[in-house]
Structure formats: structure tokens, C-alpha cells
Amino acid sequence: MLNDLTVRMEAIVKKLRGEGKLSEENIKESLREIRRALLEADVNFKIVKSFINNVQNKAIGSEVLKSLTPGQQLVKVVHNELISLMGDKLLSLNLPHNRINKIMLVGLQGSGKTTFCAKLANFYRKKGNKPVLTACDVHRPAAVDQLKTLGKQLDLPVIHHPSNKVSKIATESIQYAEKNLNDLIIFDTAGRMHIDQEMMQEVLLLKEQVKPDYILFVADAMSGQDAVNVAHEFNIQLEFDGVVLTKLDGDARGGAALSIKAVTNKPVIFAGIGEKINDIEEFHPDRMASRILGMGDILSLIEKAEASVDEEQALKISKRLKKNLFTLNDFYDQLQQLKKMGPLDQIIKMMPGMESKMLKNVDISGNETNEIEAIISSMTYNEKEKPEIINGSRRKRIASGSGTSIQSVNKVLKQYDHMKSMIKKMNKGMKPGKMKFMGK
Ligand SMILES: Nc1nc2c(ncn2[C@@H]2O[C@H](COP(=O)(O)OP(=O)(O)OP(=O)(O)O)[C@@H](O)[C@H]2O)c(=O)[nH]1
Ligand SMILES: [Mg+2]
């Protein structure tokens, strides 16, 4: 997905994240590179200009958080700007079951409307809606058959009519939905190579007739700025509610994904990511921004860490750690903290000077934390404070008390030992302030 842009941005981000100090010069250099990357991704030049301006103003004005390096901080600003460029947050359609919701799909020929009708029907059926597909593309002879085939595949009704009159088909589909208690009608419409008045007239009439709850403009992400221009034109004439970006799985450069919201002021709601029925995703601007910057969930980890870490507590625990006072009680508290923040190895990767391979033997994940918690809870206060007193018979008692096995108890003690030795290593190489991510 948006491979070239991602590769470029990843390289910029990688360089930036390592920067302990940012000078005006290296900020400028990074912004120049980002600008180039966006332009090459076919993002509208006006949008690129205001994007770079915003980043520059925010990067210079913002206070550097203690928990981030200046490089990370700039990445965060870029990330936030990308999110707001693509629409801040996910917008979901509201399709209550107690009425007939109508969604109309419009767009140019080959953009993926018909395919997306099926994807959308399947998507909402999984959420409990009862959809009907309506074949209002009466121009291309095979269009009705295409939708019929998709309907058959999904075992969903497809409404069509030999008269090939759009208004007639629309009326029939509403009657069908009323009779069969369907709560969702999806209207497929005809596309053209270019915007032409006949097509526009047809969709305008359909809009007038059925009064859709949502009109979604389907845009082929591969066609970059062209898609954005067409979207603009459709929006002026038809006033759609949101955008579906299809073919994001291909080698789309990003121009459409990054510009369409800014140009039309309508959010991208869905992404098509393949030819199959299940190749549909809700479009999350934040995840997309993270993908583009090639940082997966690292940024949300930074945010989670910022939100969940209490400075004072962090200082307290980092003092304890500094003195190598790391008991099983602390281990337990750390687990609670980590559960809030996510996988340990990713957190470690964010900590300067740490590598995830150091964690090889402290692989604590998901379900395992529950067992560890049970085991530690079965220990006495003394055992937790002085783990070295946990001998064979105590291990046996803890195992039966926690409903686990002696092996599991041994494993937890081993993990604790590893974490303790890791902390010792960290204490040698880090300043206490940096312990924040491990803090409580
Ligand atoms: N790779 C990929 N291909 C897609 C996606 N969506 C649709 N396609 C393909 O794009 C082609 C056109 O899709 P259609 O759904 O027929 O497009 P349309 O907008 O209905 O086209 P017209 O009815 O001619 O206006 C088909 O070959 C689809 O399989 C997608 O998200 N990814
Ligand atoms: Mg079609």
C-alpha cells in the first residue's frame, strides 16, 4: 500500500528518530525531503505547501516532551499533520435496523463501484444488517450480470428489471426491501470514462427519487490527481457524503489518499484493498499515517505511554530500579503497566540504547500475563520482596495455589531474573529520565 511513499518517508523518519538534537538546518533538510516525497507521490502541490508550512510552525513552536527525542518529536508532528490531512478520525456510517438505509455508489468507469457494492453489503451483513443490491447500471450490458454473480456468491438478492429504466429499478428495490424487511439497499450506478452530463443527470435523478442516506464516491486510488479532480467535480454537482478509495493494494502512489479530503472536504470512509469480497477496510486516517511513515503502531505506543505514565510514579520506580531494588512486587506492577501499553518488545525498541534481542528471554505477551499474575498473586509478601527464599516446597505451594505447574512458576521466576538483569544493564547505560516508558 503506497509503497514508494512509505519507503521514502520511512527513510526520513529513520534518520530523524535517531537525531538527539535538531538544528534549524536539519529540520529544513528533513522538510525538503518530505516535500519531495509528497510531490513524487502525486500529492497536490498546494496541499504539500500548506502541509510543510503547518509542520514547520508546529515543530518550531512545540515544547519538546521529555520522553521523546527531538527527532521523534518532529516525526510526531508530521504524523499528526498526515492524520489531519486525511481526516482526523474514522467516520462510520450510521445504519440503524429500524429503517431502510440507502447507499448510492457513484464514480467513473472501472473505479470499482460494482465490486464495492458487494464488499459493502457483505461488510454490513456481518454487522447485522440485511442488505439488497440494486443494479442501476443499465448502460453496460454485462453490468447487471456482474452484480448478479456477486449477489449469488454472497447469497444476497439483486434487484434488476428488463425495462432497464433506472427509476423503475429503484422503485422495485424499495418495494422489495419493504416486503422482505431489508434494512439496507445499495445502489450500483453506471460509470463513464469521463464526467458527462448524461451520467450526472442519471445519478442526480436517482438521488432525487430515492433520497439516499449516503452517497459514496468511489475513486480509483491508482489514478492519483485525476481521481481527486473528478471527485471535486462530482462533489460540486452531486454533493456526496464520503469517499471510497479502491485499489489501494496496487501501486497507488498516495496522491489520491492524501489529497481527496483536503480538496472535497469529504472524508475517506472505506478502502478497497483487493479484488475479493473481503478486501475492504474502514479507512483509519491514523493507521494510514502510521503506515505511510512505516512505523506501525510505534506512535500510538508513544501516545499510550504518555497517557498512562504518571511522572511522579515513574520517578519513584526509576529510583527503586536505580538502586536495583526490583522485587516481584515491582515485576507485577510493571506487568500491569505493560498491559496498558502493549507488547514489551516494541516498547523496548523505542528506548534509546535498547534492542529487542535483549528481550529474548523475557518474552511476555498476551495471555501469558494472566498466568504470571496468578502465580505472583499466590506468593506471600515476603516471597515477593525476597524471591530468593522461594525454595522447592514454596514453588510447589505457589503452583497449586495458582492452579498452574511448578514449571510455570520456575518460568516466571526466570523471567523475573532476566528482567532484573536487563534493568541492571539499563541502569548502566541510561539516565533515570529515560526510564519513563517503563514507569508506573
Ligand atoms: N486490485 C484491486 N482491484 C479492484 C478493487 N476494486 C475493484 N477492482 C477491480 O477493478 C475492476 C473494475 O471494477 P468494477 O467494480 O467493475 O468497477 P465499476 O466502477 O463498477 O466499473 P463500471 O461498471 O464499468 O463503471 C475489476 O476488475 C475489479 O476486480 C480493489 O480494491 N483492488
Ligand atoms: Mg460497475
Image: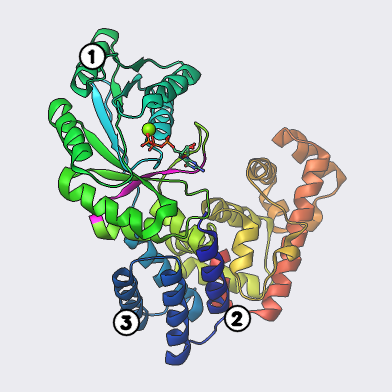
In which quarter of the view is residue 140 placed?
top left
Asked which secondary structure carries label 3, the reply is helix
Residue 248 at x, y percent in the picture = 47, 49
Q: How is the image coloured?
A: rainbow
What's the amino acid at mark 3?
A: Gly
* Residue tagged 2: 431
Report, in whole angstroms, how far the alpha carbon at label 1 lies from the one at label 3. Answer: 59 Å
Magenta extent: 264-274
Which residue is rendered at x = 34% and y = 52% of the image?
A: 89
Q: Residues within 10 Å of mark 2 (few under 14, many from 20)?
A: few
Figure check: 359 above or below 203: below
Q: Nearer the viewer, mark 1 or mark 3?
A: 1
Residue 434 at x, y percent in the picture = 56, 75
Q: Is residue 184 among the parts visible in the rendering?
A: yes
* Residue tagged 1: 172
Nearest the viewer among 77 and 383 is 77
What's the amino acid at mark 2?
A: Lys
Q: Residues within 10 Å of mark 3 (few under 14, many from 20)?
A: few
Asked which secondary structure carries label 2, the reply is loop
Asked which secondary structure carries label 1, the reply is helix
